[in-house]
Amino acid sequence: MELEMAGEPAAHPSAHEGGYLPLQLTLKGFKGIRSGLGRDTLTLDFESLGEDSSLVAIAGGNGRGKSTVMDNLHPYLVMPSRAGTDGLGAFSYYDHVYLPESQKELIWAHGGRRYKTQLVFRLNGKRKTEAFLFEEQGSAWGPVSLADGTLTDGKVDTYERAVREILGSEDTFFTSVFSAQGKRPLSAFKNGEVKTLLADLLGLERIRAEGARAAETVRLLKAGLGVVRQEQAQAAESILQLERQATAPATADAMLARAQDAKKAAAARLAEAQATSTRVEAQASASAGHDGRRAELAADRARANGQHQESARRLREEQRRIDQRAAGTDQRVKTRKRQHAERRGQLQGQRDALARAAAMAAKVRWAAVRRPAAARCVEERTARLSAAQGAVDRAEALRGQVRLHRQAVEGIEREAGQLALRHADLKNRFGLAAQVPCAGMPLQGRCQLLTDAREAQTLIPSVDAQLIQLGGRKRQEQEGLASVSAELERLAGAAERRNRAEQKLEAAQARLAALQLLLARTEEVEQAAAALGPVDLELQMLGVSPAEETPEEAVERAEIAAARERLATDKSDAETALQESLARVDVALRALPPAFDSARLAAARHALSDAEGGDSTGRARRTGRGAATRANRRSAGPGRGSSCGARGGRRARHDDRGRVEQLEPSGQVLEQ
């Protein structure tokens, strides 16, 4: 098992320092544990077993429960290796538990905090699943609180929301943190799947949501800016018209006449606007109740559509899970058939090997009979080789003696040659004694030549004796050489006899080794003969070809077919319920009168407001009549009035309806 602990961006809740780590697991009532270990309950304390290890291996034979343990080392409500290649296919815990009340308890750590998952699966009567998630708080465990304040209360949806808030979505978890058995490698992911995974890891959904809100804010600001610019343009146009009217020459009487005409027109407009407003207000009041009912029916329609969409989404998800479950069943059938073929091949190979071993029984018995004779042959030939080797060694020693005798004879001959030379020299010196002139004279006592001759005469007998002695030694050495050579001649061919003895010994030893190897396989042959029957029986029971469908697979296919039928019924019921709801809403809507146009009410109120504004302007005009007369008198001179008006510094004041009510300080009242 290997859990990835690599650090990732903080935007992803399951990919930072202090990543996900399982600490302790307890399984009760799981079929995989019962069939593999024969136990109802299994508890694994990874803190004490793994200590500081970063890699933990779970070893065991096939069917011992390793996959069941691995599939439950995470808090999600799924066993990923049993739920498709992505770990999120059709899956139900009830297919993997057998006790009336089965449990899974997992203590795990993430982000420096410890959590405890408790899942209870009840099979007594109606199936029911309870899911609790606790967080370690001091020395006790308390329920986990979601971001909206909801506490985990045993409901499955609340539990799943809490796990997603802590570890993220199942897709990302089973791709980046937890590698399930048989899971697709990243290299097999499509481009869209890789983009979705990276978006989840980098937190791009939150960035997209912020971008959408920012775009909506920009849109609203642009709309408001357009309204402000429009009002600004209207105000600028009103100011321009007022400036033109203020500078145009006009008499007070003409202005008064225009004001009276405007007053009458405003009064008529006011009366008409009041009547229209009263009538429209009455119609709006009458239709208020119908609008409320119409809003209720619209809400009912939206609710029915939303429920149908949610039901359709749930049914699509269920359809996907059923399809994945069927695909998983097909894959398991293929795996079973492949394993059958592999097992049959293994058994056939094992049987062939056992048959070959059993066929050697006759050779083993023959080897048991022949081994004593082969051993005696080896002993005899070993003795012969020893004798031949002794002769070879004696011949080598004699050759050494021959070399020594020859060397001695050669040395004696060299020494004799030297003595012969000395003997000849002494004779020559002694022969000079008769030729010396001083012989017989008084000077002979002092003559050196005569002295040397006499000395040579005394040495000649000694040299002769040495020569005689060397001749005797030479004869002894020659006699010894002849004796050794005769013995060495008798040992001629000892090396060849030794080599032939070695070859015969090697052949005898090879025969003995072959016989011993055959005897060493006695136990193997006996075991092969004993094991051949069970292997033949297993091959016979296994059959040539696997069964097309096991009882468990038939039950699962029946469950899948029933689930498909149930899903089709649910789809039909959901569609029928939607059509009935929409039909009821349509009937109720047709029974209501036509909807009241709120724009009419707004237009009537706006017209009444404009009319009331015009009437107030007329009253202001009557109040300022005297001021207008005085202004007309002052404007008798063609240039003085305009100059006074210019010196007055006209200042306009207008409201949001674009009306200018007064010009100061001249007192003239104009209407745009």
Image: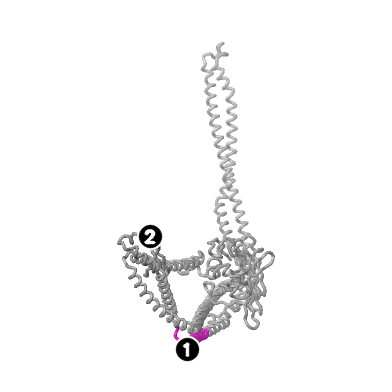
Labelled disc at residue 591: 1
Residue lying farthest to the top in this orientation:
442
Which residue is tagged 2?
A: 648
Q: Horizontal and vertical percent for residue 58?
A: 61, 67
SS of the residue under disc 1: helix
User: Which quadrant of the figure contains the N terminus?
Assistant: bottom right
Instruction: Residue at 53% x, 26% y: name it.
Output: 424
Q: Quick check: can you spot residue 70?
A: no
Q: Amino acid at mark 1?
A: Ala
Q: Nearer the viewer, mark 1 or mark 2?
A: 2
- Can residue 211 be found in the magenta stretch? no
Q: Is residue 341 above or below residue 290?
A: above
Q: Are marks 1 and 2 in contact (CB under 8 Å)?
A: no
Per the rendered image, the range of residues in magenta is: 568-595
Magenta stretch, overall SS: helix
Q: How many C-alpha atoms fall within 10 Å of the one at disc 2: few (<14), some, or many (≥20)?
A: few
Using residue 642 as the reference point, say whether residue 557 is left or right of it. Answer: right
